[in-house]
Each structure stands twice: as structure tokens, then as C-alpha cells.
Image (cartoon, rainbow, N blue to C red):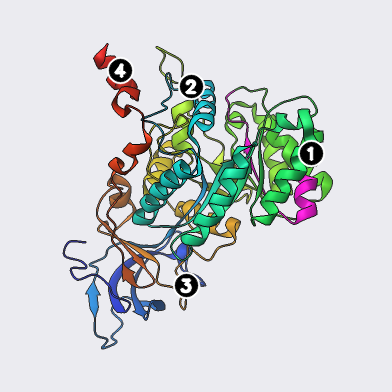
Amino acid sequence: MGHILKAGLHGSGYLKNATVPACLIAGNDGLKPEDMVAADLEISKGKLVRILPAGTPTGLHGTFDLDGSLVLPTLVDLHTHLDKGHVWQRKSNPDGSFQSALRAVGEDRVANWSAEDLRARIEFALKSAYAHGTSAIRTHLDSLPPQDGISWPLFEEIRGEWAGRIDLQGVCLFGIDRLMEDGRTYLDGIAGRVAAAGGVMGAVTYMVPGLDRHLEAVFRAAMERGLDLDFHVDETLDPSADSLRHIAETAIRVGFEGRIVCGHCCSLSVHGEEEAVKTLDLLARAGIAIVSLPMCNMYLQDRQAGRTPRRRGVTLLHEMRARGIPVAVASDNTRDPFYAYGDLDLVEVYAQATRILHLDHPVADWVSTVTTTPADIMNVSHGRLRPGAPADLILFQARNWNELLSRPAGPREVIREGYSIDSTLPDYRELDHLMQDPLMQDPLMQERQA
């Protein structure tokens, strides 16, 4: 990291003159969540031993002067699609629309999603996230037969192999309309698979006939097996889409006691004020957490050929937070038909979310959307600076929020269990063997060749 950590950290050391957000210090009594604290961090044998006021004399050896640099805990990505990622070169989105994304992913899944293909792409994504400083990821897994029989066993293998580097959680993904066909048969099968894998129950909700009945079936399947729930909800700017309200009402009606997350919730942004307020109040009452996926939704929503987009496609995070509803932001898709870009870098996600959702003036403690809040939802120990816990940190050259948000791709050093890791990102060439004529699959290259 340039002049700050020339030799790197090797298990123990004293990081002095760090800048730390108070909201990320466990047990930060007497501090306001928006405070930035000047601190010294003592690390010994891979543990964060103490967080002391800056300038506390210790006489310890192995001291590194951070000169005011920002220090964060490693980050938590609540909503991703590891199974879809990094297929852009072989299966791009021809027009950037949601329907084209659905069609392209379906075609690629049928044609290419073997265990070998999935493993290569998932491991590439995990290496990227690890190098960027992420230590916990929840991924949705396409779970219609026969794909569920390939993806879930492989996910369990990879989760074990990555234990200690990235904690992984899996969520089943299927369209709620599937339950209109062979509802109970399919639901029992996939819920059993998810329970056996220690996963999370999930579905994509649409305004289909019998929605409340189908939602209750999903809730009951989760309750019978002690599973949490994570839904894809109203990923559209159609104002008639309000399955979010139906989910909250179902949770209250059946008395669901587990954790519930709803992602996207785009249509709420185009609902009338009175209708939106009623839904927000229901969410608070039901204890539902919300995750916004700002980069993917900006890419897909309000896209029409030859027309500048007018609407951002992100949900009402400020209003939710004001009601005490837990809110997070996350990566979502990476280099696939649903989002052509991205690298599972939560620093980029947080910086873009700040701009898109106006998480500033003041910045306050909005960093909780990629740290403490998703960690609490996933029930993992990451996302906080806690004395006695592993020293899992990200050190930035930036000294404050403005410098970090202005240069999110600037120098950083990732520390895991007190050791500086190799943060070299994997080369895209590692995936070339999975691509068919990769250059000609890129729409920009096709235009040049035409």
C-alpha cells in the first residue's frame, strides 16, 4: 500500500493513526454513529486485540503509521448471483432489457451450466470478491430442475472449500408462477434440498393469480423447516406491481418468526405516496429487511431504445430507514445479461449507491448498508471491528469519506486474520476456455465487424 504498509502485516502489529467509523466499532458507547474516530489498532496473533485512542503510547514493536488512513472491517454482500456471473462474452444482452436478460440467461443455463462451467465462473467471482475485501456473500441459485441437482451440490462443495476466506449462504431461486403448475410437489422438493444444504428459502414474486396462496405455501414450507426467506420482489417500474405488500401481509398473517429479506422493490418508487406509506408501515410491522441493487437496476430499469432513462429504479431506502426497517445495498449480477459490468467490489457498490440513492449530506453511517446490517441479516460475525475477533480489515489510502467515495478504486490493502493478503485480481483470460468466439459475442465488436 505504498508508503503506509511497505512490508505488509504478518499476524501481529500496531496500526496507529487510523480513521475508523464509530458505527463499525462493536460496543461504541458514548459515540455517535456518524462520528469518525482517530484510533490505534493493536493486532496480535491474527486477532484485533484493542482499539485505542490515537496516540496511546504502548512501546509495541511492529508499528505502522497509517497517517489518518480509513480502516474498515471486511464487507458483507447480501445479494449476488454467482451462478450467472461472467458469461457476458458468450451470452450478452442484445438490448439491455429485462426480458432479454431473462431469455439470454435461460438459454445459457440450458446450453452451458455444467458443474465444470459453474465452478470456474463461481471461483473466479469469489477470487475477485476476496481480493476486494469481502468476507461474506449470499448468492441466489437458479433452482428449477434439473439445474438444482447440479448447482446445489456444487455450491456446498465450494462453500466448504472457501470456509475461512468467504462465508457463503445459498438461496433457492424460482419464479412464484412455477407453483401454478405442480406447486406442492416442486415446493417440497426444493425446500428439502435447501434445508439439507443449510440454505435460505427464496422465490421471484410476480402479480400472478393466486399470489397470496402461493406466498403462504412458500412461507409454510420455510416455517416447517426452520428456514429464513429471501425474495426477489417487484423488479419493474410497473405501478400495478405490489407483491411487496402481499409478502408483508402474508408474514403478519402466518406469524413468521424467521428473517425475511426482499430485494429490488423497484415499483415502490412509482407508487402513490399514500399507497407507498401503507406498504412501508407493513414492512416495519412485519420486520422485513430490504436490499437495494442500485447498479443492476440502473442498468435494466426504464431502458427504452433511443430514449434517455428518466427513473432510477431504486427503492425508498431513506423512508424505510426512517421507520427502522433494516436496509442494505449489494452487488447483484456481474458481467451477465442482467448487468453487463461489476466485479463483486462492495466499495464500488457503496460509492455508486451513495451517488444514485443520495446516501450523503450527511454520509452519516450509511456504510452500515455493506457492513453491519447485512451481517446481522445473514447472522455472521463480519462487518464490525470487534476486539477479540479476527483482524479482518481493509486499509485505504483515503483518509475520509469524500476521498474514498471520489476514488473508490484507489489503493487499499486487505488484511485477513492479521495478514496482508495478495490482492491481485484474477485475469479474465482464465475464463476464455468457457467462451465460444468471445470477441464476436460482444455487441460492440459485432457492430465494428458489421
Mark number displayed over residue 386: 3
Image quadrant assignment for residue 133: bottom left
Against 97, residue 219 (above or below) is below
Residue 11 image position (x, y, % from top left): 33, 77
Which mark sits nearer the N-terminus, 2 or 4? 2
Q: Quadrant of the C terminus?
A: top left
Which mark sits nearer the N-terminus, 1 or 2? 2
Q: Which one is in front in this view, the residue at disc 1 or the one at disc 2?
A: 1
For label 2, the residue is 97
For badge 2, the amino acid type reads: Ser
SS for callout 1: helix
Rounded to the nearest angstrom, the CA distance separating label 4 from label 1 is 44 Å
For badge 4, the amino acid type reads: Gln
Residue 261 image position (x, y, % from top left): 63, 47
Residue 361 shows up from this direction: no
Left or right: where 69 falls relative to 294:
left
Residue 282 shows up from this direction: yes
Mark number displayed over residue 446: 4
For label 1, the residue is 185
Image quadrant assignment for residue 93: top left
Mark number displayed over residue 380: none
